Image (tube, rainbow, N blue to C red):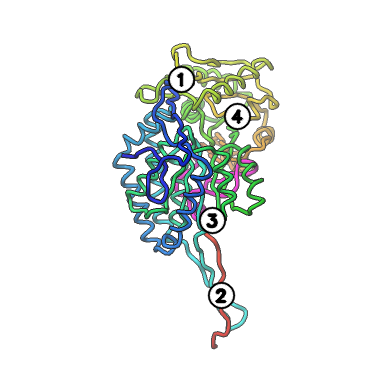
Amino acid sequence: MTPYQQLINGAWVEATNGGTWDVLNPATEAVVHTVPYGTAADCDLAIAAAHAAFRDWSRATPYERGAVLDKTAILIRGEVDALARTTVLESGKPLLQARGEWLAAADLFEWFAEEGKRAYGRIVPARTSTKRMLVLKQPLGVVGLITAWNFPAWNIARAGGAALAAGCTIVIRPSEFTPMSGMHVARLLTEAGAPNGVVNLVNGDPGSMGQAMLNHPGLAKIHFTGSTRVGKLLMDGASKTVTRLSLELGGNAPVLIFPDVDLDQVVAGATAAKFRNGGQVCVSPQRFLVSKDTAAAFTERIAEAAGTLRVGDGLDPQTQVGPLINAKQRDRVEALVRDAQADGARVAVGGARPAAQSAGYFFEPTVVTNLTPEAPLYREEIFGPVLPVSTFDNVDEAIALANRTRYGLAAYVWTNHLPTALRVAERLEFGLVGVNEWTPQATEAPFAGWKESGIGRESGAEGLEEYLETKLIAIGGVPR
């Protein structure tokens, strides 16, 4: 059983200041558990423990480190139902989706257990016969993981699995809204054999803990998953300490739907993809750009499909859309829809809090049309169950509209015309492009954000590289 405390140097502890935080169930607003809520002092202790453990962990073979990650994957799969239930209680997502998240986390640990064995160096031919040049890949050091609440297990596994496989030690700072899933990850890694100090977890004030990570000389890198606003603050801070960063930030994914597609197929997939986790997904399809020839039919069908989705508590097996994470996020989504209506947009379905839910942070699955590209609902990341529909006349206009954003994470193209698919995919300014595909991301493939959607790469071989230093060893005086 996870004690739902902080993990520092192998010990489960309370916050040094005695602080606590009530984790709320967003479906009921009831307290799920009370957990520690510390300060920079806790973060400093965790970094010190990770720094002390780095020497031995970095010198372990990739096979030894991989065995811990493999065992973690096995443990997750063995108790996935209980883990998923915890995630539902603190995040609100439907149980089936929470279960899928934990299984994807297991896949990440398993993948990096193997990929760590392929952190190859190379020999570079020298210009003189008496010289040898060796290029080595070595772990960075201590990595701080500041993760988001929308995928509280997967976000940690994606960065933590890579860092641990590379030989780094980690300090996890989960979101205060979903710390219990992170505590389970830390517990499972420890049970799988991670030595004391290799995996640490602190929960507390995000500002002071983030600053502690930036300031501590023993921390080599911060991986952050969250908003672009906070990512920029970390970049400002890192400029003073030259702390390395990986940033997985916001998105505003366009969906380009051309008139040659099977509309029923696209509507079915779009409904599932858009309203997954209540739209609280960084790669969630957001701006639906539909050919004018198809827009009316698409809007009618997607509104009908969205209107049939069952909203409720994620523990109910019939629930398809759960609550938003908190009242602030629910109110923000509500305001975006209200402001769009004031500017002339039309709500085809939804647009309000469901009358059937007397408690919880729920918002109806919503479809909005007649939007202008200047509307906040079109320009900003919604992170909620709202699907805006706009139109285009031709391919060039569709590409221009899609690229008119400061974000560059994911984009989607739906067409059965191969030249159009290739032309559009190559010109879209996004790190992930799904062509007739709603899930372009994969454990074994790079997850990349362009523009203000991030810095660095996660998953795949590129994910491991993010936690490795490159060293040249040049040896002179070698006899011919």
| Mark closer to the chain start, 4 or 2 | 2
The answer to which quarter of the image holds residue 126 is bottom right
Nearer the observer: mark 3 or 2; the answer is 3
Location of mark 4 (residue): 287
Q: Residue at x 49, y 51 (%)?
A: 47
Nearer the observer: mark 3 or 1; the answer is 3
In the rendering, at what x and y percent does residue 58 appear?
A: 44, 61
Location of mark 1 (residue): 360
Q: Is disc 4 placed on a helix, strand or loop? A: strand
Query: Which residue reaches farthest top?
Result: 355
Query: Which residue reaches farthest front?
Result: 17
> Which circle marks residue 133 in the picture?
2
Location of mark 3 (residue): 218
Q: Which residues are magenta?
A: 438-464
Q: Could you say which is closer to the camera, residue 35 or residue 113?
A: 35
Separation of residues labelled 4 and 2 (CA atoms): 51 Å
Counting the numbered discs, the total is: 4
User: Is residue 463 placed above or below 391 in the rendered structure?
Assistant: below
Separation of residues labelled 1 and 4 (CA atoms): 27 Å
Q: Are marks 1 and 4 in contact (CB under 8 Å)?
A: no
Magenta stretch contains residue 300:
no
The answer to which quarter of the image holds residue 470 is bottom right
> Is residue 281 visible in the rendered structure shown here?
yes
The answer to which quarter of the image holds residue 256 is top right
In the rendering, at what x and y percent does residue 388 appear?
A: 59, 24
Separation of residues labelled 4 and 3 (CA atoms): 42 Å
Q: In the image, what residue type sits under mark 4? A: Arg
| Mark closer to the chain start, 2 or 1 | 2
Q: In the image, what residue type sits under mark 1? A: Gly
| Mark closer to the chain start, 3 or 1 | 3
